[in-house]
Amino acid sequence: MRQILTGVTLAAAAAMTLLAAPVAMAQNGPLRITITEGVIEPIPYAVPSFVAESAAAQSYADQLSRVVADDLSGTGLFREIPRDAQISTITSFQSPVQFADWKAINAQALITGAVDVNSSGQLVVKFRVYDVFAGAELGEGMQFAGTADGVRRMAHKVADQVYSRITGETGYFDSRVVYVSETGPKDRRAKRLAIMDYDGANLQYLTDSRSIVLAPRFSPNGDRVLYTSYETGEPRVHVLNVGAVQSRILPTASGLMSFAPRFSPDGRSVVYSVTRGANTDIFRMDIASGSTTQLTTAPSIETGPSFSPDGSRIVFESDRSGTQQLYIMSANGGEPQRISFGAGRYGTPVWSPRGDLIAFTKQNAGRFHIGVMRVDGSEERLLTASFLDEGPTWAPNGRVLMFMRETQGAQGASSLYSVDISGRNLKRVPTPEGASDPSWGPLQ
Amino acid sequence: MKHISKALMLMAVLAVSACTNPDRFGGAGGGAGSGQYGAGAGAGGVIPGSANDPRSTAYFQQNVGDRVLFAVDQSSLSPQAQATLDGQVQWLQTNSDYLAVIEGHADEQGTREYNLALGARRANSVMEYLIARGIPASRLKFVSYGKERPIAICSEESCYNQNRRAVTIISAGGLTS
């Protein structure tokens, strides 16, 4: 009994259909971790090479299990038990698992998988997750089918399932990041938009570097990207269709600087800043009609707007008090409420997709920090510190932040980092050149 | 009116391309000359386009002073900045066929989008000063580069104070009528 889960279009070209079929009875074991703010002992797991069920599938079998392991271990929540420590080998997807062999090496979770190439040339990937100490399967086995160029995506989907079954949270591995790729020295830096998988694979450039481009932001479903470009001489907000790699300028006030755009959660409107004279205010535009509404009117700098996930409110930064601070207002404008009160300056607020937290950049005593606070401004926590950390973006599950870190000095360069909202697992995201202004897209 | 806006657009293009050319601004002290316009300067006579030619961009940059500097997070004009701008006013009044784009900049110690708005504040301060001293607004335009185009690249105050700047970029506007 096969059941179509979802159809996915790869930006590159080939369509990949994902099929899921239960291959075993569901049974929830006690294997469970809760993601908290405390220090977590990573769960030891094993993911033996997937079984190639035909010669044609051979070249994908090991890659699949490697990507799954990179995803899981990369969270810091799981620790892989290396292959050379494993006693059992999995040579058939159907054979019963020898739990004693996996217990002996203290693997709490076991992921087995198989890959085949079907008659229409598609890869068919199956997997099962086991709670070793309960001696039982964790959830149902599943099967995906897709084209060979989507092999990494299929592995990410497997890992998302494993992550979700063990943590109870939605995963974030089958997602993409759009960012600014940077080359050249600080005073002549060339910038172009790039898009990649969350782990840096499948990099693709979306613009050339003839004009400065800044701060791309994904639409809620990942089909479009807003960004700021100097193509016309002054910074203006552009919208780019990711599939067609075609962009157009938004009909913001002509001749004025417009920047700092972000989509509304329904993807139908955009909030952004416009500068008129010394004054920068926040506007909202309905994309279809081009009609605009001015949301702030103070003579100060208002920028960095970001919607709440329900679309009812907007968090933004303003220096109306004399320094950059965070404020929340209704999505229709009106009197805002200040939420940041700590020492230093606060900018680039971004509302968590779960709705509970605001991530921000904080500048204090010559250092930059990425931090989070509750929506009412309470429980501020700084997650990072460096010469220049800036511009957090949320993983689709609201558990991880990606941001830009720039090093100090004449040779200073930017790169992308990610960190858990607990402050754990700070690590660099691989990019072939300098990188800034990441925007994390939705789970695909 | 129509060809004015065309000219402004052309200026914007020139300003952007200028920004990608480090020689365009010369050295920090203003005396280093410009590779593009300064060649041959000092050879004796007035070479058109050289720093000896009072109508040249090189002259404007080096003798009048094309930039003013700002304190941290500020956009107010110091007495020194006002003196520089008075010189710019005089030059622009003498050379009334020139247009100017004022580019506002910030140092790297700030977030990107805020610095864009801050650079705009600085450029706007200069533009308002020039207008108040009699330069027609139609000859002026500003754009902010935030922290995207530092002129000095070290991460110390000695570089930051050069980067917190507003630079007046002049161009023969084609306003010949």
Image (cartoon, rainbow, N blue to C red):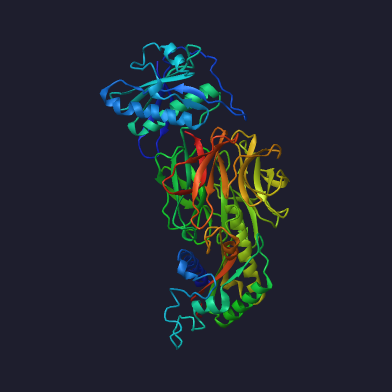
Identify the image quadrant of the N terminus of chain B.
Answer: bottom right
* Circle count: 0
Along the viewing direction, whichever of A333 and A314 lies nearer the viewer: A314
Task: In the rendered view, tell whether residue A117 sits above or below residue B155.
Answer: above
**What residue occupies the far bottom of the structure in this picture?**
B45
- Is any atom of residue A244 visible in this view? no
Residue B85 location (% of width, % of height):
62, 75
Task: In the rendered view, tell whether residue A407 sits above or below residue A115.
Answer: below
Task: In the rendered view, tell whether residue B176 sits above or below residue A119.
Answer: below
Residue B31 location (% of width, % of height):
52, 76
- Is any atom of residue A342 visible in this view? yes
Q: Residue at x 63, y 35 (%)?
A: A355
Q: Residue at x 41, y 46 (%)?
A: A432
Q: Residue at x 62, y 69 (%)?
A: B127
Q: Identify the image quadrant of residue B159.
A: bottom right
Residue A257 location (% of width, % of height):
57, 58
Task: In the rendered view, tell whether residue A239 sits above or below residue A373.
Answer: below
Residue B134 location (% of width, % of height):
64, 77
Along the viewing direction, whichever of A189 and A241 lies nearer the viewer: A189
Along the viewing direction, whichever of B109 and A437 lies nearer the viewer: B109
Along the viewing direction, whichever of A30 and A441 lies nearer the viewer: A30
**What residue occupies the far left of the structure in this picture?**
A55
